[in-house]
Image (spheres, helix red, strand yellow):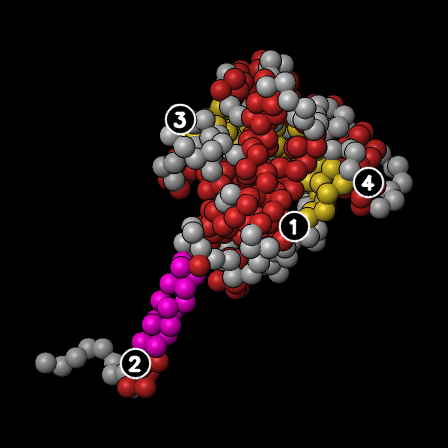
Amino acid sequence: MERWWPALPLAGVAAVGAYYVGRASTEKEQQDSSPHGYRLRTNLTDENAMRIAKFLAQYAPPLDFKFHKGQHGRLAVVGGSKDYTGAPYYAGMAALQAGAELVYILTAEEACIPIKSYSPELMVSPFYSAQAIAAEEKWATQCAAKVTSRLPRLHALIIGPGLGRRVEMVAVVKNIIKQAASLPKPLPIVIDADGLWMVTQAPEMVRCANVILTPNKVEFDRLWKAVCGEQKRTSPERDIQHLSKAMGGVTIIHKGPSDLISSGVTVLKCSEKGAPRRPGGIGDVLSGIVGLFVAWAEMGVRRQEAANEKNTTREAIYSEAAYCACTIVRKSWEETFLQKRRSSGVPDLLQVIGRVLNTLDVPLEKLASKM
């Protein structure tokens, strides 16, 4: 019988076999060395590893059998549009990979089917139609109501990924934030991407301490101009503090070579390495994980308040949650790059987040013994 496949040199077969045997051996060594079945290829700094472990120990809901569905995190992403469907998907999936249990995507009617086709884990619902957008207060109120009716059940709200820049949507977002601010207990609100553009159109909508903004350099410059006008800038650290105070004490994550985080009092600097590739979507991933971590932080604050325990300010805890989220994303992206190099993409990043997080979700005494 004539064979249809090309003959391989014996040396080539041996090389391929050696590669797979070696890879299996390496993977087994990694699994044997980690209680979670995965070992980081490069290490976090001792300070950052302990810092994230402490945050998870203090604020992440414990993994036991006492909880019900959704109690580890119910988040909603207000985003997506006729033209942009990937951004809200990335934000929602990042939150799930980091430990959230229920994620709702509230989007344009035209974006629902594409986003639903990406994953069955996301619950996707429309709150407006691109064909029916109108510059009327009644229309804006009706659209916002489809979002605000869900707010009391949420632990955090993420606004902006893929939302688009239709000026008519500014009134909708403004209405949503206003209703969220009127809830009996603070609801953390993360605003990213197109949501930040909307904030520049009406900066007064976010003057509350439970808001987290995640601008990159260009977005930060727009925010500065909208809030501070032509006021002279001094240094990145002082600028972020000044802008936070000018906006009522919001937490700002200024993304860049190093991420700066401030709620107007102190400045945290996250300098984990990351990777030299910058494809679209990493910011959306960050917004999802920030949303979850700040939701956990808010849960912890409420537990402390209920127990009449002395605690740090809500702003300080939000900043710490943001710092840990930035570190996790940077470390996960570095791990992804080491595996995929130039072909690294955000779908690959989503597969790594849980592994990186699990290496640090360990008892503090166990982590300390390795340092």
In the image, which is nearer the foreground, mark 1 or mark 2? 1
Element marked by disc 1:
helix
Q: Is residue 364 above or below residue 7?
A: above
User: Contact (CB < 8 A) between labels 1 and 2?
Assistant: no
Element marked by disc 4:
helix
Which residue is under mark 1?
47
Q: Which of pointers 1 and 2 lies earlier in the amino acid sequence?
A: 2
Tell me the crowding category of disc 4: few under 14, some 14 to 19, or many 20 or more residues within 10 angstroms, Cα based.
some
User: Is 352 situated left or right of 46 in this image?
Assistant: left
Tell me the crowding category of disc 1: few under 14, some 14 to 19, or many 20 or more residues within 10 angstroms, Cα based.
few
Dot label at residue 239:
4
Q: Is residue 155 above or below residue 357?
A: above
Identity, as a three-letter code, of the amino acid under mark 3: Lys
| Residue 54 x/y as whole percent | 59, 40
In space, the residues marked 3 and 4 are separated at their CA atoms by: 45 Å
Which residue is under mark 2?
13
In space, the residues marked 2 and 4 are separated at their CA atoms by: 60 Å
User: Is 312 situated left or right of 101 in this image?
Assistant: right
Q: Is residue 31 magenta?
A: yes
> For the magenta stretch, what is the residue range?
16-32
In space, the residues marked 2 and 3 are separated at their CA atoms by: 53 Å
Q: Which residue is drawn at 48% across and 62% down?
A: 339
